[in-house]
Image (spheres, helix red, strand yellow):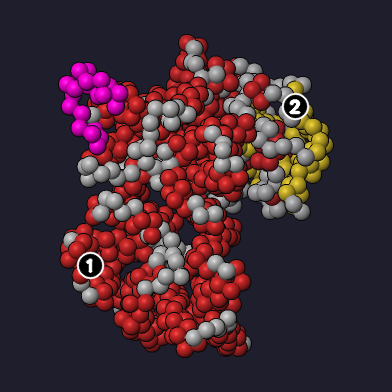
Amino acid sequence: MCNRRLLCLGAAALACVIAFMTIGLRGNIGFVLSLRAAKLAALLQVSVSIAVSTVIFQTVTNNRILTPSIMGLDALYLFGQMLLVFMLGGLGYAALDSQLKFGGEVLVLMALATGLLLPMLRRRTDMELMLLAGIIFGVLFRSLHSLLARLVDPNDFAVAQGASFANFNNVRTDLLIFAAVLTLMGAVIAWRARHVLDVVALGADAATGLGVTWSKTVTGLLALVSALVAVSTALVGPVAFMGLLVAALAERLADTRRHAILIPAAISTAIIILVGGQTLFQHVFGNSSTLGVVIEFVGGLVFLFLLVLGSRK
Amino acid sequence: MSTAAVKQSPLTGWIAGLVLAILFVLSLFTGVDELPFGRVLSDGRGIELVLVSRLPRTLAAILAGASLAIAGLIMQTLARNRYVEPSTAGTAQSAELGILLVTLLWPAANLLTKGLIASAAALIGTSLFLATAHRLPPTQPFLVPLFGLVYGGVIGAAVTFVAWQADLLQYLSIWTNGDFSGVLRGRYELLWLGALMVVFAWFIADRLTIMTLGRDASIGLGIDYRRMLQLGLVIVSVISALSVVIVGVIPFVGLVVPNIVSRLMGDNLRGTLPAVAASGAVLVLGCDILGRLIRHPYEVPVGTVMGCVGGLIFLWLLFRRPSDV
Amino acid sequence: MIRIENVSLRHGSAEILHDISLTIPKGGITALIGPNGAGKSSLLSLIARLQPLQSGTISIDGFPVDTTPNRDLARIIAILRQDSIVASRLRVRELVGFSRFPHSRGRLTAEDRVVIDQSLQQFDLADLADRFIDTLSGGQRQRALVAMAFAQATDYLLLDEPLNNLDMYFARDLMRSLRRIADENGKTVVIVLHDINQAGAYADRIIAMKAGRIAADGSPAELLRPEILQAIFGFRMEVADMGGTPVVLHFR
């Protein structure tokens, strides 16, 4: 039963991909196709990294309304990026190879995220407190980011603007290869850990009883999550509620928490939303740049719905 | 210990007042143009600068800070939750939506009209938040602010979407990030209306304190709970809408100031209201001065400075060990 | 006199109160007893206009509770709800002081202060008067809330399980204080009690409720009998007589 649902999801995702590549082809077909392929590659990576990171994060924190972005991880990435610019100096930093920079940023985020989140996860008694703290972290990092941005270049008002929402239209294609390696690695690790994740979902005590070294496993998983968040944020910018939307939908569509099913289901759902949505907005509404905002809106509503529903139990 | 705490209460207010006076003077002499103290009286241009720009800016910061802190205090009273304030409960975002719609549909409207419509929008948005917040279980105090933050985020996304479609994103940033650098004589006076609201809040301070005891206790003491709720909503909406229209969103003021004053002085609003107002003014004016100095002669908007300072204070409030026994 | 006529209350499909008619004359202590969910608290909050009436009428001294201005009612009737949570950082004296709001609208007169001090004395709170409520123990907090209801100085006092969190000493103390204000000042006390023996020892009249109806009504001696108690609570318990006071051995 589950598998049939998964197959349907996969087929729908594939249909979205084909539609994205073929609808409205005109002019120099070879050129357009290669352009679209690059963008598709980016969107697929973003889908995979958001889906996998959110599912793992929810499993580790044992909470359905927590996602890396809600805990301020993407804001933290942007802050870390700006911190590097600030410390290394704007010009010297800009001259560096973009892939090398990206690698540095990923490492900075992994260090910052595990450093900040691990102590909080130790006291995971109070979920609402963590959530609230996470959202405040988000606001704080965004403010620190724009503060640093103004210190680096006081005349550049655009920096702070660009950090506030995702744009799926201008993806950073220069990072594609490096990001692809990271995403693929992340996906493979997550897939191989799917049975461990099922155990981790039972909680620290049960997992330890079943022979999982809790702190080591959780640290590793958090590092993986932050690397994936870095990939999606670097490629398109922050997407606060996308992960939540994907995880919530995937769990309902696949009707299971087993990671062997859930992870592919979440990836397919993300592809349907992102690639399908992009196709829709490009060809039907003629304005693809607002997809990020719309996902934000719908995802936020889903979050509120889950919150009110959850508190009624 | 108890008698010391009682005696300490007025002291907190006096200290806040003194610091405010110092910051007031400091603010008049801080800015892009150098203005040495001696030149103010001797040089006509100096007086002109103070009267047209520096004084209005300083007063705007004081008025906005004081009234936003009070708005936060009242919001916390209405929601019976210490962790909410207008910018985290959809009030500020609803006001933005209101201004945006006026700007789109009636570009010629003056500031007062914009303020009124923004207030109306804020009132609707906040009422909706409160109606839902009162249904959430009171045993989980962090659920309400969480709901408010995301609720504000959803309205914010709607605002961004409309602004994007209408190509008004540039305008939007004026309202979403508080900044006093554009304040001149003739463009901030509406904020005095916020000050009026603060005075009004002081008159109903006892009733507001009783409301913190809950609906049942309030009715038991003969208070018209629903009327007071509506009255409080109007005060909160008008204050936050006006400050959004004139200077833009300044986060965290309404959150951290009432919480700190409550720790020092308790929650008897008749006694603490003046201290909350004074401390709010100190915080906002202080952050504005900091924003002017940090990268002189360029300016960092007060919204950004407050996002850092206020965020840190708030996290500290959240994670401090519950002490006072 | 509290007059209740044909009062019913529903929450969705659940019927909380079924056609209650009852008269509580002025003066004396009336205890409401009954199993959980019998509708005692709902009845109390309807009398105190904390919930809107759905059907029937309730009047206190001739004032209908649904149309009389709230402020006037607050000078006639005071209520202490079960499990009142005080989240505000108020000092004990400030909290008790707010009970004078219906009388002085926030500006305390010399007379108000006398009442507040008496109430603080009465419940042994004088030493705690300048402490913040959130630093008190559960029992001390409960005493502060009772003192607040006392200081409202109304003719009618409604108390919903006020003995919660109180130790034996203060439970006895509170019941004796209630007895005294009923006898000496002619106050009317309506109190929901879980401890049937407190009701037997201090109340003039006991009203037993079950499933939204009045199951029995009478003096302690009339009501505290094994067969009546079995009908109300569903199990048999012996009743002993201790010098004129019936004592229910409900724990055996």
Q: CA distance from mark 1 to mark 2?
A: 74 Å
| Residue B219 horizontal/vertical position (percent) | 61, 31
Q: Which residue is mark 1?
A: A94
In percent of width and height, residue A253 lies at 59, 77
> For residue B37: magenta?
yes
Q: Quadrant of residue A57?
A: bottom left
- Residue C18 in the image: above or below residue C204: below
Q: Taking B291 as reference, is B35 above or below it?
A: above
Q: Which residue is mark 2?
A: C67
Which range is magenta?
A: B30-50
Q: Nearer the viewer, residue A287 or A223?
A: A287
Tag 1: residue type? Ala
Q: Nearer the viewer, residue B255 or B138?
A: B255
Q: Chain of mark 2?
A: C
Mark 2: amino acid? Thr
In the rendered view of the protein, which quadrant contains the N terminus of chain B? top left
The residue closer to the viewer here, C29 or B83, is B83
**Subunit ID for the residue under disc 1:** A
